[in-house]
Amino acid sequence: MSETGSNKDVSEEHLPSAQAETGTVAPAGDPFADPGLPPHEHRIQDVDERAARRSERTVALLFTLSMLATVAFIAAFVAIPVEKIVYIFPIGNVSALNFSLGVTLGVALFCIGAGAVHWARTLMSDVEAADERHPISAAPEVKAGVMADFRQGAEESAFGRRKLIRNTLFGALAMVPLSGVVLLRDLGPLPEDKLRHTLWEQGKLLVNQNTNEPMRPEDVVVGSLAFAKPEGLEEHDHDFQKEIAKAALMIVRIQPDNIKDQRTLDWSHEGIVAYSKICTHVGCPVSLYEQQTHHVLCPCHQSTFDLSDGARVVFGPAGHPLPQLRIAVNKDGYLEALGDFDEPVGPSFWERG
């Protein structure tokens, strides 16, 4: 009875090792036949040094283009305004900055890849070598062979001899990461004092956000709550949201006798006090006022501030009082600011240091 599927069905003379020893060729259609390697064909760069030089210059040109594209990426990031829109056929209206960054970075990366591929296909050795499988733990002689192969590969790649390719490759690889370094700028504001200042300044009128009209003292009655913005800031401005997030103002009128803090009284006008509307916990808009206690409540996490006592925190997770804006009345009878807030508005992040 035959052993179907066992190795006894296969003649050893058809195995590659037996063929190698005997020099015989397996019959056509034999699944175990060793096809061998096709004869190696030399490329033009292998026999013509001028062709090799042309390939070298092509690779160097691609690496150089990558460097120029990286420089263009940085220049576009610095020079093109964020709000600029251009028409690109057939895409349509797109952000000029995003389009420029995408094209330049794509060209920089493509040229490095194309240069490396052209280098490998035209100048590096393309001789195929077959080797028998070996155990995972290599013997010392195998390790020595690997190192010899590595040195041979490095020599055949012409990396040391083709200095133009080597130097331009180093330049391209060194400059491409600069694109990522430049993008780090968008992770946050530059280390300046922008977060410490708002649009409020000496002589800036308090404009009612609901009526868009300058405010007079008689417009604010005891127990009322109003919201104001700096004069000149309009909702159609492209930076309105950014600026109002720092300059939003809360106006409350308290009887002067009920104001407990002396500085709060000095910075007010006839009991009209102006505080930042931005909660010092996580930046929510404070908007719930209780006129009997003069407390104002943040609806997000219930931080409570006493407006009659310097807007100090009486409850909740807020870390410090609401900043106060010093106000007065100008010669025309309108409420105006006497400067900016005395400290940064909003949450107590690192910019308060």
Image (tube, grey):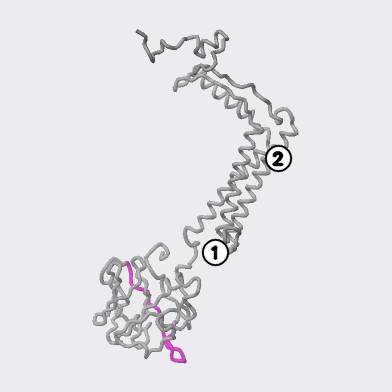
Q: Residue at x 56, y 54 (%)?
A: 102
Please give left or right for residue 59 compared with residue 35 in the image: right
Mark 2: secondary structure: helix
Query: Which label number is shown at residue 57?
Result: 2
Q: Residue at the left extreme? A: 292
Please give left or right for residue 43 compared with residue 85 in the image: right
Alpha carbon separation for disc pair 1 and 2: 38 Å
Residue 323 within the segment the image draws in magenta: yes
Query: Which label number is shown at residue 82?
Result: 1
Q: Residue 352: horizontal and vertical position, in percent?
A: 41, 66
Query: Which label number is shown at residue 46?
Result: none
Please give left or right for residue 260 compared with residue 189 in the image: left
The answer to which quarter of the image holds residue 272 is bottom left
Please give left or right for residue 298 compared with residue 29 in the image: left
Magenta span: 319-336
Is residue 22 placed above or below 203 in the rendered structure? above
Q: Residue 206: horizontal and vertical position, in percent?
A: 43, 83
Query: 262 or 10, which is in the foreground?
Result: 10
Q: Residue 30: horizontal and vertical position, in percent?
A: 51, 16
- Main SS of the magenta part reads loop
Q: Hey, what amino acid is under mark 1? A: Val
Q: Hey, what amino acid is under mark 2? A: Arg
Q: Quadrant of the N terminus?
A: top left
Residue 331 within the segment the image draws in magenta: yes
